[in-house]
Image (tube, grey):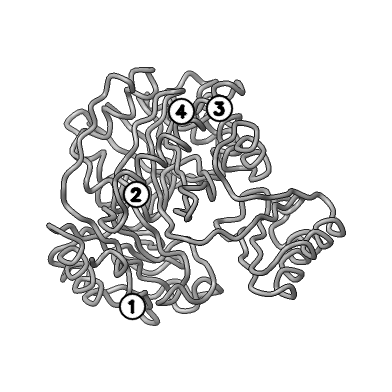
Amino acid sequence: MRILVVGGGGREHAICWALRKSPKVSELYCAPGNGGIAEVAECVPLQVNQFEEIGQFAVDLAIDLVVIGPDDPLADGIVDHLEAKGLTVFGPRANAAIIEGSKVFTKDLLRKYNIPTAAYESFERYEEARAFLDRLKAPYVIKADGLAAGKGVIIAQTLEEAEKALQDIMVAKVFGDSGNQVVIEEFLTGQEMSILSFVDGETVRPMVPAQDHKAVYDGDKGPNTGGMGTYTPLPHIPQSVIDEAIESIIKPTARAMVAEGRPFRGVLFAGLMLTPDGPKTIEFNARFGDPETQVVLPRLKTDLLDIFLAAVNGRLDQMDIQWSDEAAVCVILASEGYPSSYPKGLPITGLDEVQDSLVFHAGTAAKEGQIVTNGGRVIGVTALGKDIAEARAKAYADADRIRFQGKHYRTDIAKKALV
């Protein structure tokens, strides 16, 4: 089969790597891809928002399946556009991708169907939002309604920080139209957990759970990022709690979307908080997580293409999906200055010295035969092991072997799991 993956980050590299293992894949393309993806797929110089060009390419090459990686094109309706051309696509249509594209929609959906989440209110006017802050205690959680490249959620420790966040989002419009509405919700405390699930309507097939590290510095300090590292499994979280999250949150949400006439087909990503009152929903995403995918897919024993095809053909309920018992740890190597401004085009060395890890390229490019930096999160180093400690040791040893100017990374990824 001929497969096209849309996207160019670490998530897409992991997807391409997993698809390349399938004996059914004869040709694999990625648009636009990156310096590392080029080693497993043919990169196509098309951007993720070029729907017409992507569709024409897929039609011209008789692509059998298109897999959508990032959030923006899903929310903007790329699946609808490609399906209208007669193409088969793995990913939710726009009316289902709204579960990530609008936080107000999602919070209202959870409230309507009594699915556990933080208490909240939503606002279209700055004055009303500002007045609501006076009724709350710090810290404050403020979310821009729409997509904001993973940076639209601000946890303000003081009233002054919360006021500034509202000003930035609703008045200064730092996230553009994504800030036309905001959600202000209660601050939940507890362990965070991510569960990605393959979903086809009411059929939910959960993947192995993972835990992300959002803050840029050790000890969860500093501004939030797209994710500085992940690990799976979560030995310090009881299986009963994981099962409760699936039964009380993920499956009811899939059913709710069907009831709303918005059946979800693709990967539904649940960001969860394990509170003293049980699991609660922080957010839903409408696609594979990044960097969760980089630890989850290496543990997948079942052919990923078979799962994709089952989902798009309404046969996901017939799939028996198998996972390895190994642990996986991913350490993100970031550019100097990230998550603020950072340089690009810096040469990366040591990639050929990696011994025990998978190297998933996130923000890289190939330039005159050399791999160079081309993003904030540059590379994800993923290692497998019999347990978290072994996988962690391998990942950090290989992270040190890769070099570029200004490289920084967290040194405490998966420490919580060393029980």
Q: Assign a secondary structure to mark 3.
A: helix
Is label 3 in contact with label 1 (beta carbons under 8 Å)? no
Q: Secondary structure at mark 1?
A: loop
Tell me if residue 271 comes above or below residue 53 in the rendering: below
Badge 2 amino acid: Thr
Which tag, 1 or 4, sits closer to the chain's start? 4
| 100 lies left or right of 65 | right
**First of labels 3, 1 by sequence position:** 3
Are the two marked residues, 2 and 3, in contact with CB atoms closer than 8 angstroms?
A: no
Callout 4 amino acid: Arg
The disc placed on residue 404 is 1
Q: Percent x, y for residue 1?
A: 27, 26
Q: Nearer the viewer, mark 2 or mark 1?
A: 2
| 127 left or right, relative to 262 | right
Which residue corresponds to mark 4?
265
Q: Residue 256: which disc? A: 3
**Based on the displayed image, in which of its 4 quarters is residue 266 positioned?**
top left
Q: Which residue position is annotated with label 2?
A: 293
Disc 4 to disc 2: CB gap under 8 Å: no
Question: SS of the residue at dot 2?
Answer: helix
